[in-house]
Amino acid sequence: MPIEFATADADIAKCFPVVVQLRPHLTEAAFVEQVKRQQEGGYRLVYLEENGVKAIAGFRILEMLGHGRFLYVDDLVSDDLERSKGHGKSLMDWLAVYARSQHCTSLQLDSATHRARAHRFYFRQGMAIASFHFSLKLND
């Protein structure tokens, strides 16, 4: 199953039916526009396609004093109808190989506290809870 980078608008748009399952507030046009904007800051979108897009990952390469150089996964989504078929694992394996090729020392992500199924998946991939992520909303 090939994993491809989505750079053209058409490739980004074909990822939308999977992405909207995790990010239901987005419209297709807003999604394509936001991905293009985020790509200017280093965001990359990849997808696994086999008779349609089965899973996507959006990520960035970051560097921080406390973590060094690492790959941060913003979005990781498998099509609800295609769960437990190995697509998520294939993407995680690909991301780890890509991170190493970019001289990253780790792969990191945040997962909402209510996503128990996702947490089980990440544990099965060998990930551990390394920290808490705190957030402060700045709008009224």
Image (cartoon, rainbow, N blue to C red):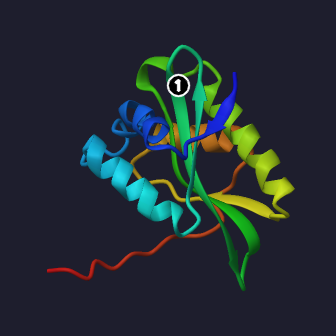
Which picture quadrant has residue 22? top left
| Residue 43, position as x, y percentages in the image | 55, 60
| Residue lying at 43% horizontally and 32% vertically, measured from the top left | 14
Q: Residue at x 35, y 35 (%)?
A: 21
Q: Is residue 134 left or right of residue 65?
A: left
Query: Residue 122 falls in which quadrant of the image?
Result: top right
> Which corner quadrant holds the N terminus?
top right
Q: Quadrant of residue 57?
A: top right
**Relative to residue 56, is residue 67 depicted above or below?**
below
Residue 87 placement, left or right of 14 = right
Question: Which residue occupies 25% across, 44% down?
Answer: 27
Residue sitting at the far left: 140
Q: Position of residue 125 (x, y in %)?
A: 71, 40
Q: Quadrant of the C terminus?
A: bottom left
Identify the secondary structure beneath mark 1: strand
User: In this picture, is 76 found above or below 130?
Assistant: above
Kindly identify which residue carries mark 1.
Answer: 54
